[in-house]
Image: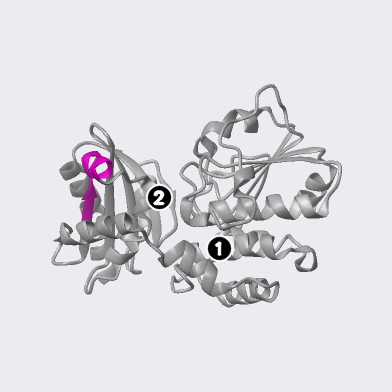
């Protein structure tokens, strides 16, 4: 395969994911980094991540992930993982532009095919699942497998989202055979919360609002609230999924204030609404069931715009 040949021939490789990396982004980047380190020689291999959430700190060698781009370096190959568009690379975009060759490996249907070589599997549960199709199982260490398993776990919501297929389960089973502890990965990275994180979760649930006859639920996290609890964006992980399982809800929305009249939107669907179509309208993207975007305006403007699009889709669904 041409992609594997490019990796084999490159003397210097940069691996990077999207801004505000989630489980699949961190898992795929660190997983490929470890795999190449363990199975190649005479290569300079660097992995870049804006940050690694504390919940993922149990992964092997997380401290080797670079959060600042190296200066005066031009890589033979830049591999973008779990990233739908070039601008989502953040601080590594210049390294991407200066690289001799570029590859994008992803599973987002909204991927803009921004690299020289693009491998996007829209039906895959995660980028980690896509990577497992490239990498040789016999050459995987337990550390590599643990990273890849984490990514699959997070993008499938512990195998309960509709993107979970037989291939997903077979891939996860293969990783478990490498020695991964499923309970450790799932508990440590997905369910375990600090007291502060539980406080924010409780407040978001308490202050959530139902709209459209209970078909939409949304909650708002202000900058003031983030400062009060000393919270990072990663501390909000899991809140949107807890909102989504509210009885009767079709779409859950979590709005986080990033600046004056500027908001980060996370959306989850229970099946009838394609939230990726809505987020794409506002410059974002993702999956049918889970997507996000940035929006300007007051929180009321944001919710009015989103609820209108959701209502339109629900009416089309019932026709």
Quadrant where the C terminus is found in the figure: bottom left
> Which picture quadrant has residue 86?
top right
Residue linked to disc 2: 234
Magenta stretch contains residue 293:
no
Residue at mark 2 to residue at mark 1: CA–CA distance: 16 Å
The magenta stretch spans which residues?
A: 218-228
x then y, percent, for residue 206 = 16, 61
First of labels 2, 1 by sequence position: 1
Residue drawn at x 27%, y 64% as measured from the top left:
243
> Which picture quadrant has residue 24?
bottom right
> Which picture quadrant has residue 160?
bottom left
x then y, percent, for residue 190 = 44, 64
Residue 156 appears in the picture as rendered: no
Residue 261 appears in the picture as rendered: yes
Secondary element at tag 1: helix
The colour mode here is one colour
Q: Is residue 15 left or right of residue 255?
A: right
Magenta stretch contains residue 227:
yes
Residue linked to disc 1: 150
């Amino acid at each position: 395969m041409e992609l594997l040949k490019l990796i084999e021939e490159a003397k210097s490789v940069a691996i990077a994911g999207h801004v505000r990396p989630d489980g699949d982004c961190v898992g795929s980047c660190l997983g490929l980094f470890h795999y190449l380190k363990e199975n190649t020689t005479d290569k300079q291999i660097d992995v870049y991540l804006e940050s690694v959430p504390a919940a993922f700190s149990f992964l092997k060698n997380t401290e080797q992930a670079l959060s600042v781009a190296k200066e005066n370096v031009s890589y033979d190959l830049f591999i973008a993982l779990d990233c739908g568009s070039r601008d989502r690379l953040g601080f590594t975009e210049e390294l991407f532009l200066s690289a001799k060759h570029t590859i994008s490996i992803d599973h987002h249907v909204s991927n803009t095919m921004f690299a020289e070589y693009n491998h996007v599997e829209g039906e895959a549960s995660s980028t980690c699942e896509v990577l497992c199709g490239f990498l040789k199982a016999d050459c995987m260490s337990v550390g590599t497998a643990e990273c890849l398993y984490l990514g699959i776990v997070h993008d499938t919501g512990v195998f309960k989202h509709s993107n979970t297929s037989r291939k997903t389960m077979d891939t996860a089973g293969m990783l478990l055979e490498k020695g991964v502890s499923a309970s450790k990965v799932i508990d440590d990275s997905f369910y375990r919360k600090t007291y502060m994180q539980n406080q924010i979760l409780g407040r978001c649930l308490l202050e959530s609002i139902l709209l459209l006859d209970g078909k939409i639920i949304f909650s708002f996290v202000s900058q003031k609230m983030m400062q009060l609890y000393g919270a990072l964006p990663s501390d909000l992980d899991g809140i949107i999924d807890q909102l989504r399982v509210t009885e009767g809800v079709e779409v859950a929305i979590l709005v986080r204030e990033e600046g004056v009249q500027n908001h980060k939107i996370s959306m989850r669907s229970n099946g009838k609404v394609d939230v990726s179509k809505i987020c794409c309208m506002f410059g974002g993207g993702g999956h049918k069931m889970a997507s996000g975007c940035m929006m300007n305006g007051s929180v009321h403007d944001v919710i009015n715009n989103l609820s209108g699009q959701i209502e339109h889709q629900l009416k089309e669904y019932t026709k």
